Image (cartoon, rainbow, N blue to C red):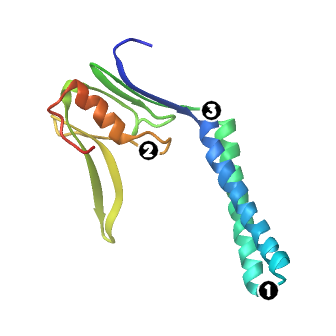
Amino acid sequence: MKTDVVYYYKKDRKQQSKIFINMGVACIAYIAGLYGYEDFFNKTVAEDFKFYYILIFTISSVILFYIAWWHRVHPGTYEALITKDRFIVRYPESEMWSFEVKVSDIERFEHRNTLSHAGKGIAKSGVLLKDGSFHEVCMNYGGNINKMYSAVKTIKNEVTGFS
């Protein structure tokens, strides 16, 4: 990598799948915990509760293991790179969340809430450029917008935002 790199973050889907595997295992642990509770304390829970509890955690674990499997068979890599000149985000299979801008064009980092007929929508974090365009920095792969802001701030001190 070049020496002018100020910030670099990379995570692939195989690494991301570990989160879903851990959550699936936690669902199974909750089921085992229910049986352990009954066995250890010699108490039984209501049959309706037990049925839905096991059903919900079983379905949840199956879905989570499926998502983990999907991440492993559909390779892709998320990268966020900040050099002294450029801010680059490469989101796998998404042009909407991938961008490359000049650091000198960044005006500020900001959080935005969209408004809908139902009120506040999903919050978005990203960079606002001098031309008024906004580029969302998606956090699905665990990137840290505060660290990105701090890295850009070391290059261009007049950038405003959050820390």
Q: Is residue 131 left or right of residue 117?
A: left
Determine crowd level at label 3: few under 14, some 14-19, many 20+ residues with C-alpha closer than 10 A: few
| Residue 41, placed above or below residue 135 | below
Q: Give the amino acid type for the residue marked by disc 3 in the picture.
A: Pro
The answer to the question of whether label 1 and label 2 lie on touching residues, with beta carbons closer than 8 A, is no
Residue in the foreground of this view, choosing between 96 and 103 = 103
Residue 70 at what x, y percent from top left?
Answer: 67, 43
In the rendering, which numbered label is found on residue 47? 1
Q: Quadrant of residue 96?
A: top left
Mark closer to the chain start, 1 or 2: 1
- Between disc 3 and disc 1, the foreground one is 1
**Residue kind at label 1, given as amino acid type:** Glu
Of label 2 and label 3, which has the lower sequence position? 3
Residue 44, position as x, y percentages in the image: 81, 85
Query: What's the amino acid at mark 2?
Result: Met
Q: How far, Cα to Cα, is label 2 from label 3?
A: 18 Å
Q: Which residue is mark 3?
A: 75
Tell me the residue at 19%/25% (across/down). Answer: 104
Image quadrant where one finds the C terminus: top left
Circle 3 — which element? loop
Q: Are marks 2 and 3 in contact (CB under 8 Å)?
A: no
Earlier along the polypeptide chain: callout 3 or callout 1?
1
Location of residue 39 (image quadrant): bottom right
Q: Which residue is mark 2?
A: 139
